[in-house]
Image (tube, rainbow, N blue to C red):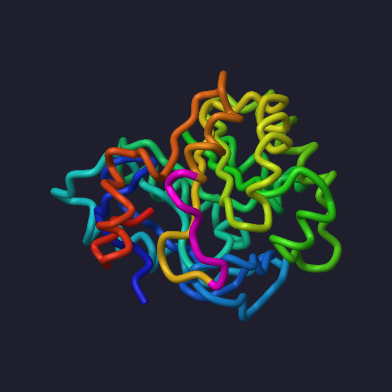
């Protein structure tokens, strides 16, 4: 499995070089809509899954001559579970001047060491699919010991001290579409630099919402800097995506 891939077209960032520090399905959540599939290793324990040297070698093969706008740390699970994430970020910084982003489910933000690591990034995109504990448990199905209140508190605190861009992403499905107003209120409290409104367009057990439903959801986020997957120029159209010509990210 590739640790570095792309550049690929991302509806969030443009042309993105992806870095996967896990290369396996390991996550602190088992989200009902996950487009990777059921979480095979649900944990909050950090490990070194891929050596920093391996990622550095792969970056050196991909970066030269690559036309990209950003390097995005993501992959098949929760990237902040990589124990060597700080080393990986340092390696990327040494090889390129491109901004570095990470897609995280926010579960490790309550850890002080992780917040210090994430402060070295340019963009942190934090997941927020629920506005209360019961919806969090129903949709994200976290590993035992994770508490929604702690995660939400530290998203807010991280935003207040982070010098880069703190952005939110919400995946809307049938289970949370009727709570768009409540989620928008929470987002307004956080005051992120951007809010991404998404719905599963690749294979998912939950299926995707219609464009009309997504447009109605977007109305609740008025006053915030919002980008919806259904009207992103980078993502073209639902029809193209569902016909198998999806761009990534």
Asked whether 210 falls inside the magenta stretch, the response is yes
Q: Residue at x 83, y 45 (%)?
A: 150
Residue 164 visible somewhere in the drawing: yes
Asked if one can make out residue 57 in the rendered structure from this viewpoint, the answer is: no
Q: Residue at x 69, y 34 (%)?
A: 181
Judge whether 27 appears above or below 153 on screen: below
Seen as rendered, the residue at the extreme bottom is 40
Q: Position of residue 95 (x, y in %)?
A: 31, 46
Q: Please state the total of marks drawn on the protein image.
A: 0
Direction from residue 124 to residue 43 in the image, left or right: right
Q: Residue at x 49, y 30 (%)?
A: 226
Where is residue 91 shown, x and y percent of the image? 41, 50
Q: Which residues are magenta?
A: 205-212
Q: Is residue 114 left or right of residue 55?
A: right
Q: Quadrant of residue 49?
A: bottom right
Magenta: main secondary structure equals loop
Q: Nearer the viewer, residue 13 or 118?
A: 13
Q: Is residue 230 above or below residue 26?
A: above
Q: Is residue 158 magenta?
A: no
Pick whichever, 42 or 241, lies toward us.
241
Query: Residue farthest to the front?
Result: 212
Q: Say above or below: 79 vs 213.
A: below
């Amino acid at each position: 499995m590739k640790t570095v891939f792309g550049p690929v077209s991302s509806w969030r960032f443009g042309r993105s070089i992806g870095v996967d520090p896990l290369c396996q399905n390991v996550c602190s959540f088992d989200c009902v809509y996950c487009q990777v599939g059921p979480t095979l290793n649900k944990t909050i324990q950090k490990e070194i899954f891929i050596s920093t040297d391996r990622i550095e070698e792969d970056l050196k093969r991909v970066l030269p001559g690559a036309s990209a706008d950003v390097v995005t740390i993501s992959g098949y699970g929760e990237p902040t579970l990589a124990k060597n994430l700080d080393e990986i970020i340092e390696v990327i910084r040494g090889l390129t001047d491109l901004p570095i982003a990470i897609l995280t489910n926010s579960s490790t933000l309550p850890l002080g060491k992780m917040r210090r690591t994430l402060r070295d990034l340019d963009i942190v995109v934090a997941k927020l699919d629920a506005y209360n504990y019961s919806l969090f448990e129903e949709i994200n199905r976290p590993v035992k010991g994770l508490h929604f209140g702690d995660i939400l508190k530290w998203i807010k605190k991280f935003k207040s001290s982070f010098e880069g861009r703190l952005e939110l992403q919400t995946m809307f499905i049938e289970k949370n579409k009727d709570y768009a107003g409540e989620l928008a209120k929470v987002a307004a409290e956080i005051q992120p630099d951007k809010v991404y409104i998404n719905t599963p367009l690749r294979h998912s057990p939950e299926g995707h919402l219609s464009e009309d439903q997504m447009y109605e959801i977007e109305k609740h986020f008025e006053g915030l800097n919002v980008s919806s997957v259904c009207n992103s120029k980078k993502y073209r159209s639902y029809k193209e995506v569902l016909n198998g010509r999806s761009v990534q990210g």
